[in-house]
Amino acid sequence: MNEFMMIFRTENMDNSAQTPEEMQAVMQIWQDWIGGIAAQGKFVSTNALGSKGKTVTTEGVITDGPYAELKEIVGGYIIVKADDLDGAVKLSEGCPILSIPGGKVEVRDVMVFES
């Protein structure tokens, strides 16, 4: 099996208005979806990304925020195992980000370099 990364993209959303209970409910939906992939033996790893960061250009210019010029943000990723790209795309079905207006899952193959 090959590894694929699903990158979760959405328009910049302000989640500060969510109650702790609402945040927990959202986290449970994500855990259930990821758990379904893990139950198939296809889960490798996952993480959410914070909103703090800096961008460095080839000219050495450093700007605050990784999304200074973009309308979309990358909120996190998961690495999964699948036979091929179509199989990895199938695993993205039911991803919670797809229930959010403007939500997207980018599925990419992970290149492995022999050392």
Image (cartoon, rainbow, N blue to C red):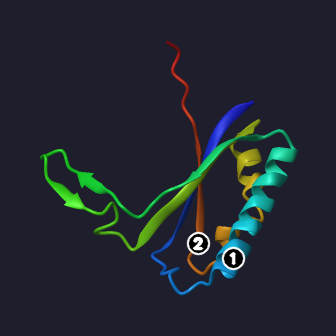
Q: Residue at x 28, y 56 (%)?
A: 54
Side of 66 where 99 appears, left or right: right
96 up-or-down from 14: above or below: above
Residue 40 in the image: state x and y as whole percent: 87, 43
> Left or right of 22: which side holds 41?
right
Q: Secondary structure at mark 1?
A: helix
Q: Which residue is mark 2?
A: 103
On screen, residue 107 versus residue 94, left or right, reads left
- Residue 59, percent across and down? 12, 47
| Viewer-closest of 109 and 8 | 8
Q: What residue appears at the point 29 percent right and 69 percent down from the top-left corner?
A: 69
Q: Secondary structure at mark 2?
A: loop
Is 109 on the left-hand or right-hand side of 80?
Answer: left
x 59%, y 67%: residue: 104
- Identify residue for label 1: 99
Q: Indicate the amino acid at tag 1.
A: Ser
Can residue 6 be seen here? The reply is no
